[in-house]
Image: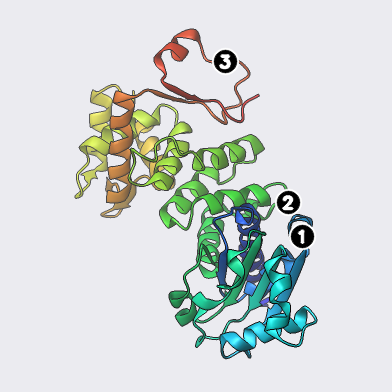
Amino acid sequence: MNAEPKRHDEKLHNLAVDFAISQILQDIENPEVLRIRISGRDGRRVTSAVKYLPQIQKMFSIIIQVDASSCLNIRTIEENIAAHLGFSTWEGCRLLLENTSILIFLDDIHEEIDLYEVGSILLNSKNIQKIVCTTTYEQVYRRMVVDLEIRLEDHLLSWELFYLNAGKIVHSKGFQHTATDVVGKCCGHLLAVVLMARALKMVSGAIIWDSASCILGLSYRVDQMKDRVLCNALTFVLGHLGSAKECVKYSAFHLGREGINKIHLIMEWIGLALVITFDEGEKIVQDLINAFLFEGFQDGCSVRMQDEIREVLVDMFRLEINTHFLLLGGRELSKAPNEEAWKEASEIHLMNNK
């Protein structure tokens, strides 16, 4: 009776582990990333998988994995590393370590260890040397200064939200990798996770999923937008709203925190020729609720925008007034935009088209 929930829970944990592995592979070659910390219950699964990957095997001359759960101080960790390398003492292996490209996995670090000292001798070498630690202790990941932190529980929460809002398609073989990438590029921003999941729900076109991943990774507005991740998520959502985008634009500028009666809002849209009929306006309202751009209240009679969404939308629309962006990625275009569109745009994005 409980088999299905358990399988579902295990799938989510597997996806979180897969994301952590992908993140390590993405950053391991960065010369500024020397210490990596993985926190959460499946950290050892991550390190055990990473050490056998061809990319890792090629990059490092020596790869060792140390069970640090019984190491109560730095000295015992050093002795364990030496033993794995075939030396009886730490001093005996120092020359080897200083002249070797090495990757050290320290699993289940104890909470009493001052982790900043771990690898202080190693990480001054001209060779590629990295330390990856795993821990389940909150005190440890608060005390350790690292270059990259991967918190599996954070990614698990993101996955749970994404799965709940996007549906079973995230487990489909053809979409799992891209879904992992989309959630990863949300960087733990839960509002962005929900927006992207709602936008991709029931979408079976691989090109649209690829477009979602590309747009989330854009950095062209990083110096102009307070929240790059949410801005990019909203850019993707707006790009697939069609004519409803103008309704969103009007609402972002004119809806207050208190919201508005749904009928009044639709009548305003009709008055501005943003929609033609009341039924069309009512459908758009429901679509925007489903997209998480609107939320209904007062038994569905009124709608409002979350402050965070409205503020970013206002910044985006104001930016469009001053700088024209042409965002046509992931629309399965087979022809280039017309000449007028090219002339008016200061920046054009055409990724993932035919």
Q: Earlier in the sequence, mark 3 or mark 1?
A: 1
The residue type indicated by label 1 comes to Leu
Query: Please, what secondary structure does the residue beneath circle 2 have?
Result: loop
Query: Please, what secondary structure does the residue beneath circle 3 have?
Result: loop
Q: Is residue 31 visible?
A: yes
**Residue at the image position 28 percent from the left and 31 percent from the top:** 318
Give the residue number, with chain letter if any, for mark 1: 53
**Residue at the image position 55 percent from the left and 69 percent from the top:** 37
**Residue at the image position 27 percent from the left and 42 percent from the top:** 262
User: Which marked residue is nearer to the observer: mark 3 or mark 1?
Assistant: 1
Residue 286 sits above or below residue 151 on the image: above
Q: Is residue 293 left or right of residue 168?
A: left
Q: Residues within 10 Å of mark 3 (few under 14, many from 20)?
A: few
- Contact between labelled residues 1 and 3, with CB atoms less than 8 Å apart: no
- Contact between labelled residues 2 and 1, with CB atoms less than 8 Å apart: no
Give the residue number, with chain letter if any, for mark 3: 336
**Residue at the image position 43 percent from the left and 37 percent from the top:** 235
User: Alpha-carbon distance for marks 1 and 2?
Assistant: 21 Å
Residue 263 sits above or below residue 122 on the image: above
Give the residue number, with chain letter if any, for mark 2: 173
- The spot of residue 9 in percent (x, y) is 62, 70
User: Alpha-carbon distance for marks 3 and 1?
Assistant: 41 Å
Instruction: Name the image colouring.
Output: rainbow
User: Which marked residue is nearer to the observer: mark 2 or mark 3?
Assistant: 3
| Residue 282 vs residue 243, the one in the foreground | 243
Q: Earlier in the sequence, mark 1 or mark 2?
A: 1
- The spot of residue 212 in percent (x, y) is 55, 40
Q: Residues within 10 Å of mark 2 (few under 14, many from 20)?
A: few
